[in-house]
Image: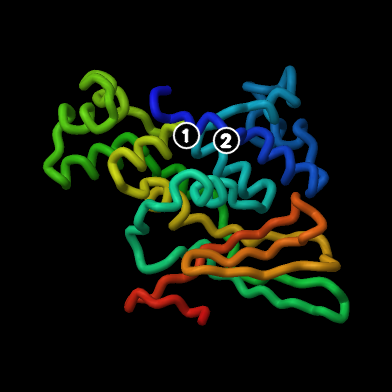
Amino acid sequence: MKDKAYLLKVQIGRMIKVIADINGVSPSTIVNALFPVRYQMNPNKFFLLDDIDAKDLVRISFVLNYNFLEQLSMMCIPHLPVSGDSFESAKYSITLDPIKKSYSIAGKAGNCDFLNDINVGLSIRSFAESNGQNQKDIAELLKCSQSSVSDLYTKESLKVKELFWISEKLNHYFVYDLFLSRMRIVPSYTPFYQFTITFDEFEVRIKNPNDDSFLMVYLRQRQANGQNPIQ
């Protein structure tokens, strides 16, 4: 994969398994709900996947109530600029109750019906043409042949790692434009007994220091003046 080595370290199937186990969701439940043909004979194989179609990962995110695409984006391409004022998907209200040692999360949830309107290849082509870039230009940036670019433009969806790779090479956050800006997932977790909240310029993290599987990451809303609302 040439210089895609950093993406090889990301095991998407294992990430899905961690969240599925926390929620008590079996691989058979996910497969029966979303992929009854592809993995019906061996549902456990699903958790061994190294990569997955981006649209499928969005569907899984809604089933498990966890935004995998957002988490993976922060792991792999956090440096890409956001082409909007804020991350709509991060607008939640978290209420902490230290007496009951629990919390609740409120927000406007949605569904993945918007996926029917998304054509990844066409979006990449439109982006290139709006910048005056032809297939030869894109081929040079992606280090591939022009025929590969022509084939790319016909694909309605791509695997997550390939989409990350293209986003980085074209310096455009396609993952946000196509998916994250439209995803409305309000997560829910079991009560906590100890937690830490940290934040920097870009994100807020809620973590249980005694449980590595417990981690919630929220991208901070960006205001029009470039300042963050949390001070």
Q: Secondary structure at mark 2?
A: loop
* Residue kind at label 1, given as amino acid type: Lys
Classify 229 as above or below 55.
below
C-beta proximity under 8 Å, tags 1 and 2: yes
| Residue closest to the eye, 25 or 197 | 197
**206 left or right of 120 in image:** right
Q: Position of residue 144 (x, y in %)?
A: 27, 22
Q: Amino acid at mark 2?
A: Val
For the image, the number of numbered tags is 2
Disc nearer the start of the sequence (1/2): 2
Which residue: 12% across, 42% down?
132
User: What residue appears at the point 82 percent right and 79 percent down from the top-left corner?
Assistant: 98
Location of mark 2 (residue): 10
Answer left or right for 78 relative to 141: right
Name which residue lies at 71% across and 36% down.
Answer: 30
Image coordinates of residue 148 in percent, x first then y, are 28, 21
Q: Position of residue 163 (x, y in %)?
A: 41, 37
Front position among marks 1 and 2: 2
- Nearest the camera: 101 or 107? 101
From the top left corner, tell me how far across and down residue 161 is, in percent. 47, 34
In front: 101, or 30? Answer: 101
**Disc 1 crowd, CA 10 A, few/some/many (<14, 14-19, 20+):** many
Disc 2: CA contacts within 10 A as few (<14), some (14-19) or many (>=20): some
* Distance (Cα) linking label 1 and label 2: 9 Å
For disc 1, the marked residue is: 161
Residue 31, by quadrant, is top right
In terms of secondary structure, where does tag 1 sit? helix
Q: Give the quarter of the figure containing the N terminus.
A: top left
Which residue sits furthest left? Answer: 132
